[in-house]
Image (cartoon, rainbow, N blue to C red):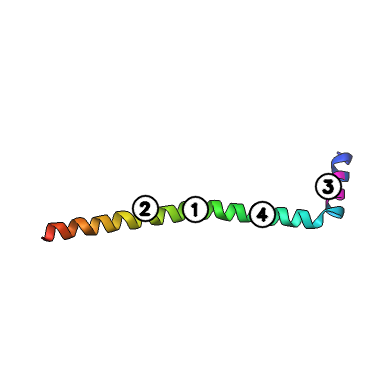
Amino acid sequence: MPTIIRIIKLILKKHKRRLALGYISVIGAALTALAVPHLIGQSVTNVLDSGERDIRGLWLL
């Protein structure tokens, strides 16, 4: 256990910038992972809605 604590202290002391950039990178990846399915779902909904409108237009002819 003391070895792990020493390693963590070393990382916090000598690699603050890399640690901060790593956290930013992880947060960005998580936000992207959450946003992509939402965008795909909106795109599919738009395509299906436009197809439904076209079919209604054909019935009116």
Q: Quadrant of residue 7?
A: top right
**Which residue was labeled with disc 4?**
25
Measured Cα–Cα span from mark 4 to mark 1: 16 Å
**Location of residue 11 in the rendering, given as x and y in whole percent from the top left corner:** 83, 50
Q: Secondary structure at mark 2?
A: helix
Give the quadrant of the N terminus. Answer: top right
Residue at x 23%, y 59% (from the top left corner): 53
| Amino acid carrying mark 2 in the image | Val
Please, what is the three-letter code of the amino acid marked with disc 3? Answer: Ile
Q: Is 14 within the magenta?
A: no
**Which residue occupies 41% across, 53% down?**
41
Residue stretch rendered in magenta on the structure? 7-11
Pointer 1: what residue?
36
Secondary structure mainly formed by the magenta segment: helix
Q: Is the residue under label 3 in contact with that under label 2 (CB below 8 Å)?
A: no
The residue at which mark 3 appears reads as 8
Quadrant where the C terminus lies? bottom left
Q: Amino acid at mark 1?
A: Val
1 or 2: tag closer to the N-terminus: 1
Q: In this rendering, which labeled residue sits more in front, label 2 or label 3?
A: 2
Q: Secondary structure at mark 1?
A: helix
Q: Residue at x 34, y 58 (%)?
A: 46
Please tell me which of labels 2 and 4 falls first in the chain: 4
Give the number of the disc on residue 28: none
Mark 1 to mark 3 CA distance (whole Å): 34 Å
- Picture coordinates of residue 23, whole percent (x, y): 70, 54
- Marks 2 and 4 close (CB-CB < 8 Å): no
Q: Are marks 1 and 2 in contact (CB under 8 Å)?
A: no
- Amino acid found under the numbered disc labelled 4: Ser
Q: Which residue is mark 2?
A: 44
Secondary element at image label 4: helix
